[in-house]
Image (cartoon, rainbow, N blue to C red):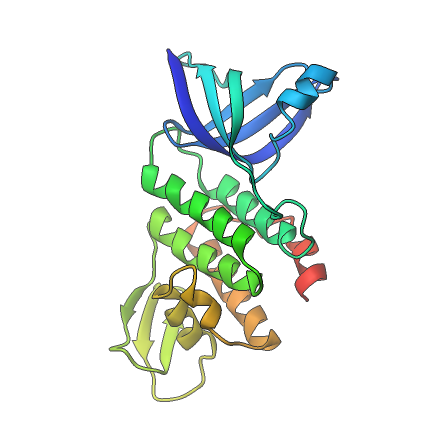
Amino acid sequence: MIVKTEGIILRTFRHDENNLIARVYTREMGARSFMLKGFRSATGNRKYSYFQPLSVVEMVFLFRENRDMHRVNESRPAFLLRDAQTNPMKLPLGLTMAEIFYDCVREEETNTPLYDFLREAIRALDESEQKHIHDFLRFLLHLTGHLGFLPADASGDSQYARFDFRTGKFSATPTHSDLAGPLLRRFLYSDWHTCRDIAFDGQEKRLLLNTLFEYYRLHINGFRYPQTIRVFAEVFG
């Protein structure tokens, strides 16, 4: 069966001397692996130059049932990213997003809302002029909705919401003891533009990240801190 679909490159691996394996999240068929033949040749290098993590490409490939690897017949960029793959402030965030998505989403089935969410997250990061960490935090929180454990809000619109990452619930609290709760709740109701209006300092940023990663660890069996978090930490502290 010939399949034409759009896909987002999550990760690439060198295979042998001239070939490349790409793990791609496709709009039509979920997470799939593809072999790119002759990647290091002059022709192949030009043809597959856009097969880098975070790239969004249009592909045509022959799908064969029970095959773990598929071969791309035709491909071209769906759109070109401005600087998400080169900007030293954006790239660590984008690679961490792709790594988390790669580790958490393995289903080989159509999930258009999830595909569109990842596509929008990459475009939001690419188009942002500043406060890139806000895009990353919103991505982490709202990805949980597609994974089945989006936090529930039982805070009654309290400005002192407390977040319990074990139960995945916001509840009302009369004190300021939970610094992460009110901020995370604002991210819960934000979009890609309004999330950048949320103000926090360096200590609160680290608290938000630690809370979200712990939340993932408790709700996804085998979840591990992303390897790219080391680069992320060097850039953002």
In the picture shown, does residue 94 fall above or below 34? below
Q: Position of residue 102 (x, y in %)?
A: 51, 39
Quarter holding the N terminus? top left
Q: Assign the C terminus to one quadrant of the image.
A: bottom right
Please name whichever residue, 96 or 225, is drawn nearer the observer in this view of the structure: 96
x 64%, y 48%: residue: 227
Total number of numbered labels? 0
Coordinates of residue 147 in the picture (x, y in percent)? 37, 47
Q: Residue at x 40, y 20 (%)?
A: 4
Residue 9, x across and y down, in percent: 54, 34
Q: Quadrant of residue 160?
A: bottom left
Left or right: 166, with 59 as reference point: left
User: Is 113 placed above or below 47 here?
Assistant: below
Q: Position of residue 203 (x, y in %)?
A: 60, 76
Residue lying furthest bottom: 175
* Pick the front one: 90 or 203: 90
Q: Nearer the viewer, residue 134 or 233?
A: 134
**Camera sees residue 82:** yes
User: Is 120 situated above or below 156?
Assistant: above
Q: Is residue 70 visible?
A: no
- The answer to whether residue 49 is left or right of residue 193 is right
Q: Nearer the viewer, residue 3 or 70?
A: 3
Describe residue 42's horizontal placement relative to residue 182 as left or right: right
